[in-house]
Image (cartoon, rainbow, N blue to C red):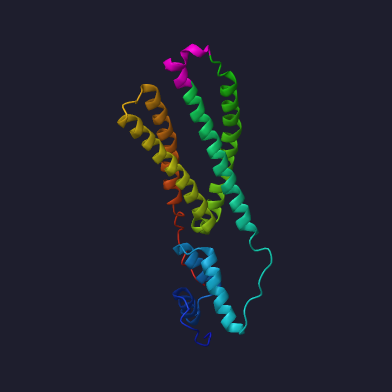
Amino acid sequence: MSTDLPPTPDSRSELVQFILLARDRGSSDEFISKLLRDYGWPSREVERAFFEVYEGLVGRPLPTPRGGSGELARDAFFYLLAFVTLGIWIQALGEMAFIFIDHLIPDSLNSGYGSYDPSWQVAFALARLLVAYPVYLGLMRQINRDLAAHREKHFSGVRKWLTYLTLLVAAIIAISAVIAFLTSFLRGELTPRFLLKVLVVLVLDGGVLWYYFDWIRRKPAPKVLNLAHE
């Protein structure tokens, strides 16, 4: 059965044209939709293409739903909270490493000011680590579960924007650490104590950059196509 849709302006996408041709050859909308999703098209793009097809069939636009941004707001909440807790526990871990370095290599310039008790600082850093790290793990588990269940979320603008914003902050921190290292080196003021602290920053920050650059490039696992068609 032919759809007999009137020609549309140049905005007609290749995806819409494919759907029209497949319908003309007898394929059902369900089969076409599954085929496109299994091939890697985001569900939202497939739905929009079908919206355009049916708008042409009935001759009027689809009604605008209310509250359609709720899912995006939920995703943004999870991503923002995950990245905030990431920053908290990474900073706490780095602070504990700095305290250990200060204890391992005391600052001779401050040795005359009496003994320094870092117990409160250690306790505060440990408390942040014990609270923020489990929350971060739980959030990332939920986010990855959503990505596995909804393949189109790999291409979500919320995921890409907030992840790249986190990567930007991490890159700025890494660049600042390298600048501080080179400044001390060129002035001849580089000490083992300062070098170890720079290494701590680069290791922690480099781990974040490595993980999230790999994470944002991940694609949904391809589904096995079942071409059995009535």
| Residue 157 seen | yes
Identify which residue is drawn at 50% across, 54% down: 161
Identify which residue is drawn at 47% across, 62% down: 38
Query: Which residue is at the front of the view, 203 or 222?
Result: 203
Whether 225 is drawn above or below 108: the answer is below
Q: Is residue 119 magenta?
A: no
Residue 62 at x, y = what percent? 63, 76
Identify which residue is drawn at 57% across, 82% down: 56
Whether 227 is drawn above or below 222: the answer is below
Residue 134 at x, y = what percent? 58, 35
User: Which image quadrant for residue 89?
Assistant: top right
Segment tinted magenta in the rendering? 100-115
Residue 72 at x, y = what percent? 60, 57
Q: Is residue 107 magenta?
A: yes
**What is the magenta segment's predominant secondary structure?**
helix
Whether 120 is drawn above or below 34: the answer is above
Identify which residue is drawn at 35% across, 30% down: 184
Residue 112 at x, y = what percent? 48, 12
Whether 201 is drawn above or below 2: the answer is above
Instruction: Classify residue 124 as left or right of residue 155.
Output: right
User: Which image quadrant for residue 177?
Assistant: top left
Query: Which residue is at the front of the view, 142 or 74?
Result: 74
Query: Which residue is at the front of the view, 150 or 196?
Result: 196
